[in-house]
Amino acid sequence: MVLLNNSQSDRSYAILGTGALGGFYGARLQQAGAEVHFLLRSDYQHVRQHGLTIDSVQGNFKLPQVHAYASVEQMPPCDVIVVALKTTQNYLLPQLLPPLVSETSTVLVLQNGLGVEAEAAQIVGAEKVIGGLCFLCSNKIAPGHIHHLDYGAIASDTTQTTTSPAASPGRCLKSLMTSAEPMSQLT
């Protein structure tokens, strides 16, 4: 296991969309010692009471307590905001992103589809947005319960330029990686 170093674990993370993808990466970050805030909808009560359970090929674990929220207005601004919603929910981004983004925040978009980064950039500015491509096989099998079958690497466009201190693609994405193989290959 590769754990977060002090500068990475000092960052705060907001996970918008705590499903198979956002729940898995957010849980790995919290497991590694990072401060993680999860936005939930239908699973909110369950996760607030019981936490998150991850069944993984890299080792099962349970987070009995997580920072769970039903509304972004209750969440603090964070250093890295991970957008892991289904793209059909992107019409909510103008309400979801502004309360979480500070002057130094980075928005990491981990969604299927083309041009999804542009939607976030229109709201928070292109200099704050990084697009990522996940190579992950996982399912949400029950409320607050994620089954990770394989993979986990995240690639990003390393040609993107951003002015956010936390936004270097390598730094931001390496923070999401907690297992040396196969998740450490970043491009």
Image (cartoon, grey):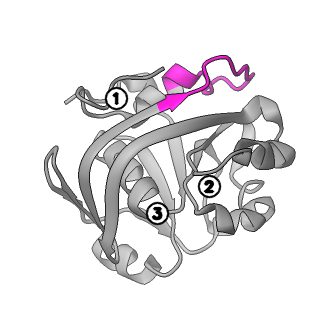
Residue carrying label 3: 18
Q: Earlier in the sequence, mark 3 or mark 2?
A: 3
The stretch of residues the image draws in magenta is 155-171
Crowdedness near tag 2: few (<14), some (14–19) or many (≥20) residues, C-alpha within 10 Å: some
Q: Quadrant of the N terminus?
A: top left
Identified at 49% across, 29% down, the residue is: 155
**Front-most of 156 and 16?**
156
Reading the image, the residue beneath label 1 is 4
Check disc 2 and report its element: helix, strand or loop.
Answer: loop
Gap in angstroms between the C-alphas marked 1 and 3: 21 Å
Question: At which x and y percent is residue 44?
Answer: 46, 77
Amino acid type of the residue tagged 1 in the rendering: Leu
**Mark 1 against mark 3, which lies toward the viewer?**
3
**Label 3's element?**
loop
| Amino acid of disc 2 | Pro
Residue 104 in sight here: no
Numbered tag placed on residue 76 in the rendering = 2
> Real-space Cα distance between discs 3 and 2?
17 Å
